[in-house]
Image (cartoon, rainbow, N blue to C red):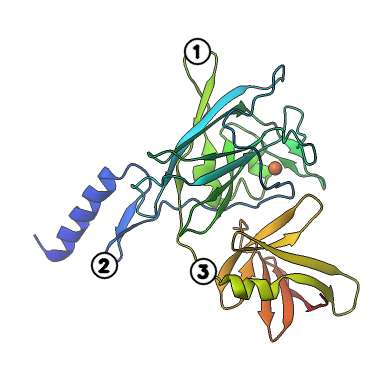
Amino acid sequence: MKRRKFIEASALSVVAISSFGFIRFDGKKYVGDCETTTDILGPFYRPDSPMRSNLNISGSKGKPIHLTGIILNEDCTTPYANAKVELWHCDHEGVYDNSTPAYNYRGTVMTDSKGQYAFDTILPVPYDAGGGLIRPAHYHMMVTAAGYQTLVTQLYFSGDENIKKDPWASNDAAKNRVLEISPDGRNGNIVTYHVGLSKKLNVEEASLEKLTGTYTAENGDDSLELFQKEGRLWQKNEVFGIVYDYLGNNTFEFPGLHDGSYRRLIFQNGVLKQEMFQPGSEVKSRSFTKIS
Ligand SMILES: [Fe+2]
C-alpha cells in the first residue's frame, strides 16, 4: 500500500471508532475537530446558579425534557470528569428569571467519572428579542473545564421554524446544535448533546487584573466596565455581564458571531480600542481610556 493510501485508510478507521465528531492526524498526533461551536452568551447569564440537575418547578407548564450528554476532551473520545456545566433558559412563557433568589430554570452540575451531565427541565419556547427578532427555543450552556477554553453555546431544536430567520441558529456553525427531541417511551422526552472542548489560550491573571476597571469613551458619551471572573474578561451589563474569549495579542473577542462579523476589545499602550465589524460595512472603532 502506498504511504498516502495507508494514511487515508488509518485515518478512516480512526473516524469509525470515534464516538463523536471526526479525528484527523496533525502530523504528530490525532486531534479532533469535534469541538463544540460557540454561540452568543445573550444578556441574561447569571453566575453561581444552584447546584442541581432538576430544574423543574412544581405545577409549571412546559414539555418535560431530559437533557443529557458527555463532555469530551479535544481528542473527541476521552470523557472529561468534573467539568462544570451551567444551563439557563426561559420559562414556558419566554421569560428569564433575571433577579429572584430561586434562579428559576438555572442550574449547575459537574460531570461524573464518565463525563456525563444531565438536567431535567422543560422545553423553552421561542421569544421576542425585540427589533422584529423572534429567537427560536434554545438552551444556554456554559462549560468550564480546567485547561480548556470556557465554552459558551446554545442548543436549538429541530422543527423550530424560527431557526431559519435567526442569525445565530441558522448559521452553519449551529448546524450540529439543532437537536432532535426523542420520546423516552414513558411520558418524557430526551435531548442528547455531547460537547467537544477546545484548547485554551491563556491570559495571565495579573495581566487581566491590569485591564479591569471603568473606561470612558474619548468623547465622553459612553463608558464601560470590565471585570474578571475565573480567568476570563467580562463586560458588565444589567444582569451580570458578557464574556470575551482571548484571541492572543492583547485582543479579546465576543464569542458566537459566525457570520463574518466580530466585536473585539484590543488593549494597546493603555488605550482600549473597541472594534465592531459587520460584512458589507466599515469597521467601527472607538477608543476608551481607563478612569478607575
Ligand atoms: Fe436566550
Q: Residues under labels 1 and 2: Cα distance?
A: 48 Å
Under mark 1, the amino acid is Arg
Q: Residues under labels 3 and 1: Cα distance?
A: 46 Å
The residue indicated by pointer 3 is 202
Classify 34 as above or below 106.
Answer: below
Q: Residue at x 21, y 48 (%)?
A: 13
Left or right of 12: which side holds 239? right
Per the image, label 1 sits on a secondary structure element best described as: loop
Pointer 2 local density, CA inside 10 Å: few below 14, some 14–19, many at least 20: few
Give residue 186's mark: 1
**Would you identify the image quadrant in which residue 87 lies?**
top right
**Would you identify the image quadrant in which residue 231 lies?**
bottom right
Q: Position of residue 133 (x, y in %)?
A: 76, 44
Q: Residues under labels 2 and 3: Cα distance?
A: 22 Å
Classify 291 as above or below 262.
Answer: below
Among numbered discs 3 and 1, the one appearing first in the sequence: 1
Ligand 1 within 8 Å of disc 3? The answer is: no
Among numbered discs 2 and 3, the one appearing first in the sequence: 2
Q: Quadrant of ligand 1?
A: top right
Under mark 3, the amino acid is Asn
Q: Position of residue 99 (x, y in %)?
A: 80, 41
The residue indicated by pointer 2 is 28
